[in-house]
Image: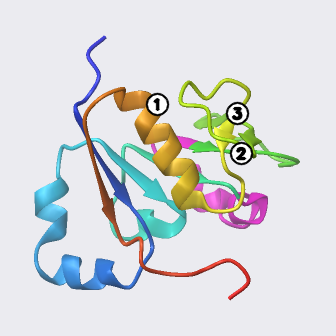
Amino acid sequence: MQFPKECIIFGGGASISEGLQKGLLKEIENKFVIGCNYSYNHYIPTFTSFVDKTFYETNIDTLKDLPLIIGQGKKVKSHLANSIFIPCRGDYKRDISGGVYTAKLSGMYALTLAIYYLGRGTIYLLGYDFGVINK
């Protein structure tokens, strides 16, 4: 199997709007894209990542139509066939043994997966300018 050498992580920050206006979707067509949470409302990524079970359970009717979802899945009641659940851990391990870093932010979870899947390569972070823990 040949792994990609580039990954785009599509976050939920306000800067995505500017990118969309400038033709971002055309630029990321046919690329390896990890979407965070609701990014699928703008673009269907290679897979959608999440860490919050409420996100998964609240949007299950929409998520069932996506190609692949990878998320924490801790205490998720319903499991869709297109979903893979990988637990989270509090410390970073590049090989994701014992879980993916971290359950606090879906962007960090997605970044850890991107590093793992690429091994070596380039990761582009789009829309990483929104939200903070505890305001």
Q: Which residue is mark 2?
A: 72
> In the structure shown, which secondary structural element does the residue marked by tag 1 occupy?
helix
Q: Up-down: is 28 above or below 22? A: above
Q: Residue at x 46, y 30 (%)?
A: 116
**In screen coordinates, is 35 left or right of 81?**
left
Pointer 1 residue:
116
Q: Amino acid at mark 2?
A: Gln
Q: Residue at x 48, y 81 (%)?
A: 130
Tag in front: 2 or 1: 1
Q: At label 3, which amino acid type do we have?
A: Gly
Residue 127 place in picture, x, y as percent = 37, 72
- What's drawn in magenta, residue-wise? 52-69
Residue under the image location 70 percent in, 42 percent down: 91
Q: Is residue 76 magenta?
A: no
**What residue is pinned by disc 3?**
99
Work out which quarter of the rendered image holds the C terminus and state it: bottom right
Distance of label 2 from label 1 (alpha carbons): 16 Å
